[in-house]
């Protein structure tokens, strides 16, 4: 079950980006004029990329920044969550309680 959740967290937003790009390429072209920015967003920060494409057509202002920020927090949480969960699995863990 944990592996399934990890796969969903890693591949879910990237699959959403891919299918959204296939269905609405004009929206993505209007949002990103440079070709490398959406690719970097796809690889490293998929949730803020999704949020940016969602809010960009009407202009990014006000609470739209909150949505992009929540996407960034979701990405940071997905990258750091596994480190927090495995914090006791290090090489230098002392099992004697000392």
Image (cartoon, rainbow, N blue to C red):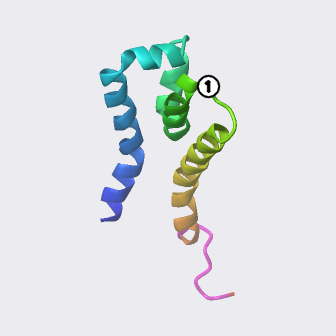
Q: Is residue 33 above or below residue 50?
A: above
Q: What residue do we see at 49% from left, 32% from top?
A: 54
Image quadrant in which you'd find residue 52: top right
Region of the chain picked out in magenta, as a range:
89-97
User: Is 95 covered by the magenta stretch?
Assistant: yes
Q: Is residue 87 above or below residue 53?
A: below
Give how far across and how far down residue 57 sits, in percent.
Answer: 53, 23
Seen from the viewer's position, the closer of residues 32 and 58 is: 58
Q: Residues within 10 Å of mark 1 (few under 14, many from 20)?
A: few
Give how far across and how far down residue 22 sits, in percent.
Answer: 31, 22
Q: What residue do we see at 36% from left, 36% from top?
A: 16
Q: What residue do we see at 58% from left, 83% from top?
A: 95
- In the rendered image, which quarter contains the C terminus? bottom right
User: Is 36 covered by the magenta stretch?
Assistant: no
Horizontal side of residue 55 vs 13, given as left or right: right
Q: What residue do we see at 54% from left, 59% from top?
A: 81
Q: Is residue 43 above or below residue 30?
A: below
* Residue identified by numbered label 1: 59
């Amino acid at each position: 079950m944990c592996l399934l959740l990890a796969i969903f967290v890693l591949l879910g937003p990237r699959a959403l980006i891919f299918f959204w790009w296939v269905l609405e390429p004009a929206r993505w072209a209007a949002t990103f004029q440079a070709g490398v920015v959406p690719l970097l967003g796809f690889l490293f920060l998929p949730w803020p990329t999704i949020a940016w494409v969602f809010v960009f057509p009407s202009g990014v202002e006000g609470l739209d920044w909150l949505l992009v920020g929540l996407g960034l927090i979701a990405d940071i949480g997905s990258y750091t969550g596994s480190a927090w969960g495995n914090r006791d699995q290090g090489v230098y863990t002392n099992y004697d309680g000392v």
